[in-house]
Image (cartoon, rainbow, N blue to C red):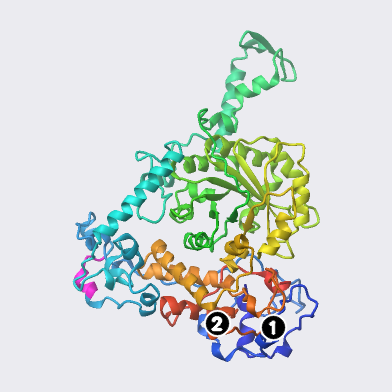
């Protein structure tokens, strides 16, 4: 994706000659047919709208300058763009109380922070968004699919279900049909999970389109730090161990301890004689397994990943509406965005929202990130009791400083004792499968996954279904190509150990690359694990399963975006706040989608994920040219086709930087 520092030089209309030329033999240069290569920005795109682009806070050369005026080392641009613009949230007093829209009495009465003046709101209610209404086929997707829209008069396509007086209509037949289908889905899920989601234990579902919603009373307990976890926190466990040791010492009158029928004495060095030291350790030192609930009758649900297309967890853009798109194009397995265990344990609603599951996600997992065994163990208690997932992925691959500095993400690869404790604690709590996703190591010169993976396999973790390896190191992030030869080497290191499937990950962007990187290695699982490739080409699962390069048209791609918006309104809401959220996530996705160059424009097939197209390029029609634009103002223009015009003060800057795309492809 192009950052804003790559956008503004074009605003100044710099010529192609001013740009550093790319050698013809550059492996990261994408070969496009000459008729589609331009010498300047396509006329159909018009001028770039600077007002929709947030200025880069570090434009130009951002090297430190000392007091003598000398330039120091250049700062690295990596990770995320910070201090991005946000939408102004609508004041609660300007929103209508949900109870009033249901024609029900408000439990808060006059102290309610929302407005009760429905008549006054209807007098000033904004009209439906024309572009959105047209994209949605003239009706609110919530009302059309569920028979009822909870946003009532505040819905921005509400004319299909709101009367002039503000009455929110309900299609009883559609509602009953939807409820029946949801009940059947919940019944099937309950039978598969040994009753853990039975009616008395399952959380209340607030809408028809997602599951894994934490009950409010549990959320309140977590926020107040009063939830009755079986697993103690690490400092509580140490205090308990210390107390146990003190009790043993106090009972050692005349330096003798009777354990069972054996007599044990303590010599001058403090060592125990007459008994195996492991027995004393087990008697006094609580371990992860000693304070986690172990159900002897529990059967593990082991997921078979072979011969399936698996969409890896993708931060921000791997949201529920995006995963629904991937399911429509043939993805077999989906996984939620990375969730931080600390936020889940504190009951943070936005973090628990990452665990939501759509009914179409028949094989669904979640990814957790933490730095300590007690965090993984405690959060797995919540996952087992209040969610319905098929596997839980332990994150050992996130390269972000925010996580690694705390010992989580890729840093946990180097803390074997904590890693083992984390896996054991999760295994004791979860009835579903466990997977581990890691990188090759910390840096490209000293990979150590080939040493770590055999150790993990030798631990004999019950329920461990697969180990997934991204073929880059932590410091590489996404630079250079993924090292599939090393991934294969890792799989070869564990021939004499109980076999756990090794799944490779990195740079799969076509069927031919899946064949070359995965199927060519007999020791790797045949899973097609997709990351950025799915973001750029959401139809990639179809290409892999049908063994072809799909020359998808611009009109078909626009339909994909319409479906995303439809799913977004169902997930984030059809009120103005929901529209804003849908637009932001759509723009984040477009910051990846523009990197796809249609098959019909290429001289050489297939396109590789890190290849850069020429600076100026056009498509076979104006819409295709618009989709090819790397400028944020043009992405905003695409969003306006579906969600209506943005405000004058609207600005966008993508969350994710793409150093790999700028530097070497």
The answer to whether 548 appears left or right of 366 in the picture is right
Q: Which is nearer the N-term, disc 2 or disc 1?
A: 1
Give the numbered dot on residue 626: 2
The answer to whether 318 appears left or right of 252 in the picture is left
Residue annotated with mark 1:
33
Q: Is residue 176 visible?
A: yes
Query: Height in image: 365 above or below 237?
Result: below
Q: Residue 556: x and y, percent? A: 51, 74
Residue at the image point whose x is 35% and y is 51% from the top: 181
Q: Nearer the viewer, mark 2 or mark 1?
A: 1
Please give the range of residues in magenta.
Answer: 115-122
The secondary element bearing badge 1 is classed as loop
Q: Quadrant of the C terminus?
A: bottom right
The quarter of the displayed image where residue 129 is located: bottom left
Query: Height in image: 6 above or below 75?
Result: below
Magenta-drawn stretch contains 121: yes
Q: Residue 122: x and y, percent? A: 23, 74
Along the viewing direction, whichever of 630 and 622 lies nearer the viewer = 622
Asked if the residue at tag 1 contacts the one at tag 2, i.e. Cβ–Cβ closer than 8 Å, the answer is no
Residue at the image point whose x is 23% and y is 60% from the top: 102
The answer to whether 649 appears left or right of 312 in the picture is left
Q: Quadrant of the N terminus?
A: bottom right
Query: Height in image: 227 above or below 154?
Result: above
């Amino acid at each position: 994706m192009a950052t804003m520092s790559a956008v503004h030089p074009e605003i100044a209309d710099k010529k192609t000659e001013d740009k550093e030329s790319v050698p013809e033999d550059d492996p990261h240069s994408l070969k496009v047919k000459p008729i589609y290569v331009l010498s300047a920005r396509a006329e159909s795109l018009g001028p770039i709208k600077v007002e929709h682009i947030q200025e880069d806070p570090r434009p130009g050369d951002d090297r430190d300058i000392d007091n003598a005026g000398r330039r120091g080392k250049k700062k690295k641009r990596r990770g995320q763009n910070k201090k991005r613009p946000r939408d102004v949230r609508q004041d609660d007093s300007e929103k209508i109380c949900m109870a009033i829209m249901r024609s029900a009495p408000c439990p808060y009465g006059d102290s309610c922070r929302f407005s009760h003046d429905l008549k006054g709101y209807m007098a000033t209610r904004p009209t439906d968004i024309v572009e959105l209404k047209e994209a949605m086929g003239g009706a609110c997707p919530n009302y059309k699919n569920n028979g009822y829209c909870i946003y009532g008069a505040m819905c921005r396509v509400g004319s299909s279900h709101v009367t002039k007086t503000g009455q929110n209509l309900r299609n009883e037949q559609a509602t009953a049909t939807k409820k029946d289908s949801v009940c059947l889905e919940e019944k099937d899920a309950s039978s598969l999970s040994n009753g853990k989601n039975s009616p008395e234990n399952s959380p209340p579902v607030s809408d028809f389109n997602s599951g894994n919603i934490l009950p409010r009373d549990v959320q309140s307990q977590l926020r107040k730090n009063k939830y009755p976890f079986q697993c103690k926190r690490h400092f509580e466990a140490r205090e308990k161990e210390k107390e146990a040791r003190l009790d043993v010492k106090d009972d050692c009158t005349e330096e003798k301890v009777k354990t069972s029928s054996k007599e044990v004495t303590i010599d001058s060095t403090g060592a125990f004689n007459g008994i195996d030291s492991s027995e004393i350790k087990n008697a006094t030192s609580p371990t992860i397994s000693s304070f986690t609930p172990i159900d002897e009758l529990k059967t593990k649900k082991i997921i078979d990943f072979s011969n399936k297309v698996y969409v890896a967890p993708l931060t921000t853009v791997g949201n529920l509406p995006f995963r629904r798109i991937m399911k429509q194009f043939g993805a077999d397995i989906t996984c939620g965005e990375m969730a931080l265990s600390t936020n889940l344990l504190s009951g943070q609603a936005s973090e628990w929202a990452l665990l939501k599951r759509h009914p179409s996600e028949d094989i669904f997992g979640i990814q957790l990130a933490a730095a300590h065994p007690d965090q993984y163990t405690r959060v797995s208690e919540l996952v087992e009791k209040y969610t319905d997932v098929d596997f839980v992925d332990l994150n050992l691959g996130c390269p972000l400083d925010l996580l690694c500095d705390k010992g989580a993400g890729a840093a946990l690869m180097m803390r074997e004792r904590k890693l083992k404790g984390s896996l054991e604690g999760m295994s004791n709590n979860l009835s579903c499968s466990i997977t581990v996703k890691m990188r090759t190591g910390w840096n490209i010169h000293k990979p150590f996954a080939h040493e770590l993976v055999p150790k993990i396999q030798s631990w004999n973790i019950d329920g461990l279904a697969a180990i997934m390896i991204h073929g880059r190191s932590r410091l590489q992030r996404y630079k250079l190509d993924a090292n599939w030869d090393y991934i294969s080497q890792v799989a070869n290191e564990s021939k004499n150990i109980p076999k756990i499937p090794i799944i490779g990950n990195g740079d799969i962007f076509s069927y031919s690359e899946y064949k070359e990187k995965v199927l060519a290695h007999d020791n790797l699982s045949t899973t097609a694990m997709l990351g950025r490739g799915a973001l750029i080409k959401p139809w990639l699962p179809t290409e892999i399963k049908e063994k072809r390069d799909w020359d998808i048209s611009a009109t078909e791609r626009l339909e994909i975006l319409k479906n995303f918006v439809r799913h977004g309104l169902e997930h984030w809401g059809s009120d103005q706040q929901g529209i804003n959220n849908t637009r932001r996530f759509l723009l984040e996705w477009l910051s990846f989608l523009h990197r796809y160059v249609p098959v019909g424009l290429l001289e050489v097939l297939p396109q590789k994920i890190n290849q850069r197209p020429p600076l100026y390029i056009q498509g076979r029609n104006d819409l295709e040219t618009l989709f090819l634009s790397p400028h944020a103002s043009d992405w905003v223009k695409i969003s306006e086709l579906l969600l209506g015009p943005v405000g004058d003060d609207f600005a966008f800057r993508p969350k994710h930087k793409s150093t790999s795309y700028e530097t070497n492809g």
